[in-house]
Image (tube, rainbow, N blue to C red):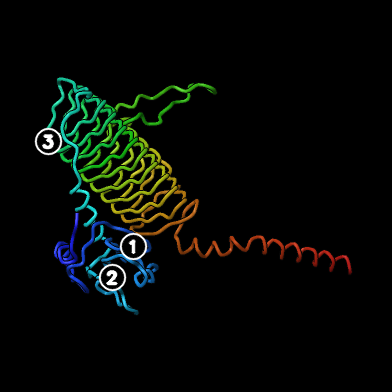
Amino acid sequence: MEFTAKAIATFLKGNVEGNPEAVVTTVSKIEEGKPGSLCFLANPQYTHFIYTTEATIVLVNNNFKAEKPVAATLIRVENAYEAFASLLELYNQSLPQPKGIDKMTFIDESAIIGENIYLGAFAYIGKNVKIGNNVKIYPQVFIGENVQIGDNTILYAGVKIYHACVIGSDCILHSGVVIGADGFGFAMQSADSYKKVPQIGNVVIEDKVEVGANTTIDRATIGSTIIRKGVKFDNLIQIAHNVEIGENTVICAQTGISGSTKIGKKCMIAGQVGVIGHISIADEVKIAAQSGIGTTIKEKGIIVQGSPSFNIHEYQKSYVLFKQLPQLRKQILELQKEIKNLKESK
């Protein structure tokens, strides 16, 4: 598909600086821009590429000031990154969309299926399942009995949803996601024996949640594991039984949240973070990568780092000392030697 700078600017409510009839047919990164492509500049670290890129059109923020001539046509917008995301969404919507029900699917006769849905080959729809309108279910998806799925949700290939779980509207579950596997519950019977604790709850995922590939969300022991509206999960995340994640929280890859922990709204949790069970984290907390959270965080909006974690500013001050420990040890040993020599010389 072809788009002119004028048409793109109209869609984004931006302003063209250069040739309004410049045409693009694809998108690119600014450092790899080729003629006929569109890219964006949002990170100041990439500013130097705008003077060398061969891209035909570049989206920039309204406050961008060129220090040298720019060959590309510029479209000035309020937020170049968000504008680029909007264009990618528009492009994605223009691609052919799968439709219909493949003859190699299994749908239990008690299931209720909405209108305009897609069911790929070898998908399994269990008893008493309810699926909304405009849902896309790709091949080899398993949906257990009594599951509910809202309108416009997408389940990519290989997603597994165990019985009685609830998935909201406008959700995206990527390949390999497992919703509703048993929580990790075992009671010790003797020194070498464990008894499995039945996990009879479910998982409830509210609207507009995206779950990355191979992420697992365990069902509750009793009650529900709850993922609130607008939450975004990266790939390879483990959410344990009875956890609750607040609205619009974002969690990056390889993070693990232990059982019965409550995480607030609009939190940002970086990669490889570990959170112990039965604690709570306040709203808008930010947790740096590879941190270990071992106690409740009560302060709204605090940034923490380290394992065990504490205020990031205190952590950064302490880190200066961490790096100097070998040198400090050497100095201490030298001082001890000098003191010994002084004592022996008396």
Q: Can I make out residue 126 in this image?
A: no
Residue at screen point 24% across, 48% down = 230
Upstream in sequence: badge 3 or badge 2? 2
How packed is label 3: few (under 14 Cα within 10 Å), some, or many (20 or more)? Answer: some
Q: CA distance from mark 1 to mark 3?
A: 38 Å
Image quadrant where one finds the C terminus:
bottom right
Q: CA distance from mark 2 to mark 1?
A: 10 Å
Between 227 and 14, the one lying in front of the other is 14
| Figure check: 180 above or below 298 | above
Residue 336 placement (x, y as % from top left)? 77, 63
Upstream in sequence: badge 2 or badge 1? 1
Residue 272 placement (x, y as % from top left)? 44, 47
Q: Residue furthest left?
A: 115
Disc 2 element: loop
- According to the image, label 3 marks what residue? 116
Disc 3 element: loop
On the picture, is 189 further left or further right than 75? Answer: right
Q: Residue 72 — which label?
A: 2
Q: CA distance from mark 3 to mark 2?
A: 42 Å
Residue at screen point 20% across, 22% down = 127
For discs 1 and 3, the disc positioned in front in the rendered view: 1
User: Residue 209 occupies which quadrant of the picture?
Assistant: top left
Amino acid type, callout 2: Ala
On the picture, is 218 further left or further right than 324? Answer: left
Residue 337 placement (x, y as % from top left)? 80, 64
Disc 1 element: loop
- According to the image, label 1 marks what residue? 33
Residue 229 placement (x, y as % from top left)? 23, 46
Between 3 and 334, the one lying in front of the other is 3
